[in-house]
Image: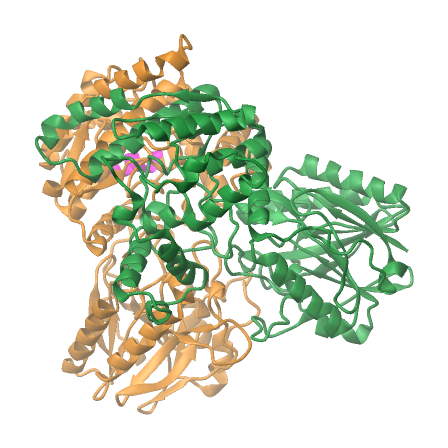
Chain colours: A green, B orange
Amino acid sequence: MKIALAQLNYHIGNFPDNISKITRSIKKAEEAGAELVVFAELAVSGYPPRDFLEFGDFINKCNDAIEEIAVHCNRISAIIGTPVFNNNKKGKPLYNAAAFLSDGKVKEYIYKTLLPNYDIFDEYRYFEPNREFKTIDFKGHRIALNICEDLWNVQDNPLYTINPMDEVMDQKPDFIINIAASPFNYHQIDIRTEILERNARKYDLPLFYVNHVGAQTELLFDGGSLVMDRHGNILDEMHYFKEDFRVYNLEDIEKDKVIRGITNTRSEIGMIHDALVMGIRNYFSKLGFTRAILGSSGGIDSAVTAAIAAAALGPENVSNILMPSRFSTDHSVNDAVQLAKNLDMPYETITIEKGFTAFEETLKPLFKDLPFDVTEENIQARTRGVILMALSNKFGNILLNTSNKSEAAVGYGTLYGDMNGGLSVLGDVYKTQVFELARYINREKEIIPENIITKPPSAELRPDQKDSDSLPAYHDLDEILYQYIELRKGPKEIIEMGFAEDLVSRTLKLVNANEYKRYQTPPILRVSSKAFGMGRRMPIVAKYLS
Amino acid sequence: MKIALAQLNYHIGNFPDNISKITRSIKKAEEAGAELVVFAELAVSGYPPRDFLEFGDFINKCNDAIEEIAVHCNRISAIIGTPVFNNNKKGKPLYNAAAFLSDGKVKEYIYKTLLPNYDIFDEYRYFEPNREFKTIDFKGHRIALNICEDLWNVQDNPLYTINPMDEVMDQKPDFIINIAASPFNYHQIDIRTEILERNARKYDLPLFYVNHVGAQTELLFDGGSLVMDRHGNILDEMHYFKEDFRVYNLEDIEKDKVIRGITNTRSEIGMIHDALVMGIRNYFSKLGFTRAILGSSGGIDSAVTAAIAAAALGPENVSNILMPSRFSTDHSVNDAVQLAKNLDMPYETITIEKGFTAFEETLKPLFKDLPFDVTEENIQARTRGVILMALSNKFGNILLNTSNKSEAAVGYGTLYGDMNGGLSVLGDVYKTQVFELARYINREKEIIPENIITKPPSAELRPDQKDSDSLPAYHDLDEILYQYIELRKGPKEIIEMGFAEDLVSRTLKLVNANEYKRYQTPPILRVSSKAFGMGRRMPIVAKYLS
C-alpha cells in the first residue's frame, strides 16, 4: 500500500485557497497510486486560527470545506485536520479533529486528547479533550491516528495524566499516523525527533508524521514531516521551510528500509536564517504585499535585516532608507551605502535634520533650557519613524522593524520610533546571534561589510554614544537574558552561575520594567523556545524583580 | 461565630505590600472579634500573575509570603488564595489553591477544580485541576470552600464535565465560601449574581463571596463581595470599585437576616465611568506616576478621557495639549479650551505646523507631486504623537490614549500617531457609549461643553472632513460591531437582523483587516465582555471575511 504525505503551507481562514491546495494534492497522490494521503492538523482552517474558532460561521465554513474535499476522496482516502463541533451538552464547544475521508464522505473523526496550553498554544481555550479511544481500520491495516501533542506525553515529568497511545495499544495497531502543527524553534527539531523516536520504540510501531510548513504571522512552521521505523530511525524526512509531497510504500517502511534518511542540515544559525527568510516571505505574500522598506543605520541589526529581507523578497523589493542626523558618523553612512550596493538594493538618503529642528523649535517654549536628555534621543528616533511610515503609506510598502531581542528585552529602543514596523525580523534573535547571522550571511562572500560587524554597536543619538555606555557587554547580557527568559531562572540561580548580583538584578529589573514597551511591539518572528509576543504573557503593572 | 471578609486591591508581585495589607486586615478582623477572615483568590501574588507563575522563584516567594502571613493567624484563622506547587509527578506544575491558615500555620489547601481558559483567562496554562474533594471543618462548622469558577458550572450548557459542589455535598457542609478573581464588565455583575443565586438555591446553603477590587493593567475588578442566604437573597454587598472590609455574624446569615442588602447602584454607564476612573488611578499609582497628559482635540473622545482622568488623578495632574493644524476649526480649539477651564485643568497650545511642514519638505524629493492622501493625514497625527511623547519623556508623565472602540475596531486611527499612549481609556467603549458617558459626566452641570457633544465628529486632518465621510453612522456601526465582536455573530446572522449586506461585509472586513493595528495598541481598560487585547486573540495574517 502506498501512503502519500502532503506538507503544505496553508493560509488561515482562506478556505478557497486551502481547499484547492488540498484537492490538488489528493489528485497528485491518486495519480501516484497512493491509497491514502495525509495532511496536517487543522489544515482546512490553517493553524492557529485562534479566536476565529469562536465564530460558528468559521466552523461551518470548515465543515463545508471538509465536505467539498471529501467529494475528491472516492478512489483514494484522506486524513485531514479540522475543527468540529462537540455535540455533547457538556464541555467546550469544539474538538480538534482528524477527519478520515473515504468513499466521498467523512467516515470517521478522531479527536485530539492532549491539548497544549503553554507558550504560544491556547488549545484548551477552544477544544474539549477526547475521552474515547479508537483506531482506524483501512484495507487490512489498523492505524493509530492521533494529533500532534497526543504523542508528547512520554517525558519524565509528563504534563498530562493520560497517554492516548497507551489507550489504543490493546487494539493492536499496525502503525502510527500523527498529524501535527508543531512550530519551529532552533531547539525544536531535535526535541521533536527525540519525542517521535521514544514513541516508535515504546510502542514498537512505524510512524508517519505530517507537519505544517510556512509562516503564520509570528509562528514559523519548519515542516520536517517524516517517516520513522519501529526502532526510531528516520527513514525519510521532508524539506525544512518549504512545501513537500512524497509517497511511500508501507511495505518498505515496515521492513525498516531507509529511503533517503536525514537530508536536511540542522545548523542552528542556518535554520534561524532560513526560518526568518520564510517568515518575511510568507508575511508579505499572504497579506498581498511585495515590497518592504527599512531604516538602514549602518549598524549590524539593520544590515542583517536587509540581507534576510533581500533573500525573502528579492533585493529590488527592499528599499534601504538612510536617515543620518548630526550625530551620525561618516562610516555609518558609508557602511549602509556599501551594504545596499553589495546586495544590489535600492537606497535613499533622507536627512532628519529638518524634522528634528522643527520639533526642537516647537517644544522650546515648554522645554526652555532643560538639558538634552533621552527626550531628544527619542525625538530623533521618532522623526525617523514618521519618515519611514510616510514612505510606507505613500508607496504601499511594509516597514520592517530591525530591533533585536537583547534590546527588546531591556527596553533599549524608542516606542513609536525605531520600534515601529509591520513585522519584527530580529526581535527573537539576541545581539550575539545577530553577529552569528551576519557571519553566516557572509559565509561565501562579503555581503555585510566587515566594518559593520567589527565596529562597536551604537545608537548614534548623541555624540560618541556606544551601546556599552548604557548596557552590559552583550556576551554577558545575552546569557543572563537567556537564563531568565528562555529558562525562567530566578535571580538567585543566575547569580549562582557566577554573574555579579548587581548586574543580574539590574538586568532583570530592566526586563520587567520594560514590559509596557514590548506590549506595543510589532509581531516578532519566533525562532526561540520563548519569544516576546503571544508565547510570553506578562503583566505590565506589577512589581516583581522591578 | 464572626466571619470577616476583606476586599482588597493587590499589586501583582509586590509581596511586601500585599503581605502588609493582608496582615493589617487580619489584625483588624481579630480586633473585631472575628474567628475567621477571608481573602480573595491568588491574593498573595495579585491576579492575574500571568507568566510570573512559570518562575520557580515567584512561587517560592508566594510560599514564603503564606508562611509569613500564617504567623499572624494564632488567635484567628484565615483563608487566602495562593499558587502552590503540584508535588505529583504528573500534570501541570501548580495548583490554584485556597490556603486555610490556623494555629500559626497552613492547616490545609483546597485546590481549584474548574480552570477558566477563555476570554482573558489562561488558568489551564499554569494549573492542574483538582480531583480530590474535601471540606474544611472549623469550630463545629463544615465549610464548602472553593475558588471562583468552581461555582460557575451551573449553566444550561456547562463548560465542564464536573461540578465541584456536587462532589462535596455528601459531606454535608453548612455554608459555602468562594474566593474569587472575577473582573468587571458592564454585564458581569448581573451574571455573577445570578450564578451565585443558583448555587445558594441548588445546594440550599448560605454563601460568602470575596472578590478582588482594583485595576491590574487592563483588568478592572469591581469587588462587590457579598453574603447571600440559602434562598439566593443578597444580605449584604460590599462597595464597587473600592476596598472594603466587613464582619458578619454567621448566626445572622443562617437566619437569612438582611444586613444592608444591595446598596450599590447598578447603572450601566455609571459603573463604566467608575471602572475607568479606578483603571486610570490604579495604573498610575501602581506604576508610581502621578501626572498624565493627553492630546485635546476639541472632540468628544479626548473630552471624556480628560474628564475621567481628572476624576482619577485630580484635574491639576492632567495636562491637556492642544495641537491645532491648518485643518483645525476655531470651534475645536475654543471647545478644548472651554473644557480645560470647566475642569480646572492645565492646558498648553502647541502648533504642529512647523513639524508638519518640515516633513512635507523633507519628503518632497521622494513624494514629488503625488497628491495629498492618507499619508499626509497620518503625518499630522504622528507629528502630534511625537510632541506628546516628547512632553511625556521630558516631564515624566504618562500619555493617555483617547481612541474609542469603534475606531479601534475599524482601524480609523493612525498607528504611532493618535494610537499612542501608555493606557487606552476608551478603547473598550463604543462611540455611542462615549456620548452616553459625556451625558453622564454632565449629569449635574455642564463639564463637557455642549458643543463637543452635539457637533458632528471629525478627525480634522483635511478640509471639512467628517467621520461620516469614511464610516457608517455610529449607531449602525456600533450595533454591527457589538454583534460581531461581543456576540461572535457571523455575517449571515447580522444581515438577518436587517443590516444591508454591503454594510456588514464592509464593516467586518475593516475589523479583520485592521488586526495589525490593534496588535500595537496600548493596553485597553476592559469594561465589556469582549475587549480588544488579551481577551481577544486573532491572527494578523489571515483571510477570513477580509
Decide which of B490, B21 is in the foreground and name it. B21
Q: Which residues are magenta?
A: B431-439
Decide which of A494, B175 is in the foreground and name it. A494
The residue sitting at the top extreme is B369
Going by the image, does B392 lie left or right of A62?
A: left
Q: Quadrant of the C terminus of chain A?
A: bottom left
Please tell me which residue is depicted at 29% across the width and 34% down the height of the picture.
B435
Q: Position of residue A310 (x, y in %)?
A: 55, 31
Decide which of B83, B166 is in the foreground and name it. B83
Q: Position of residue A442 (x, y in %)?
A: 54, 39
Residue A422 visible within the image: no
How would you classify the magenta stretch by its main secondary structure?
helix
**Position above or below: A162 against B242:** below
How many marks do you count on the picture?
A: 0
**Position above or below: A460 against A142:** above
Going by the image, does A207 lie left or right of B391?
A: right
Going by the image, does A78 lie left or right of B22?
A: right
**Position above or below: B93 against A384:** below
Going by the image, does B220 lie left or right of B484?
A: left
Decide which of A58, A79 is in the foreground and name it. A79
The image quadrant that residue B412 belongs to is top left
Q: Position of residue A315 (x, y in %)?
A: 55, 27
**Residue B436 drawn in magenta:** yes
Residue B115 visible within the image: yes
Q: Quadrant of the N terminus of chain A?
A: bottom right
The residue sitting at the bottom extreme is B140
Q: Position of residue A352 (x, y in %)?
A: 29, 24
Please tell me which residue is depicted at 22% across the width and 17% down the height of the picture.
B329
**Residue B375 drawn in magenta:** no
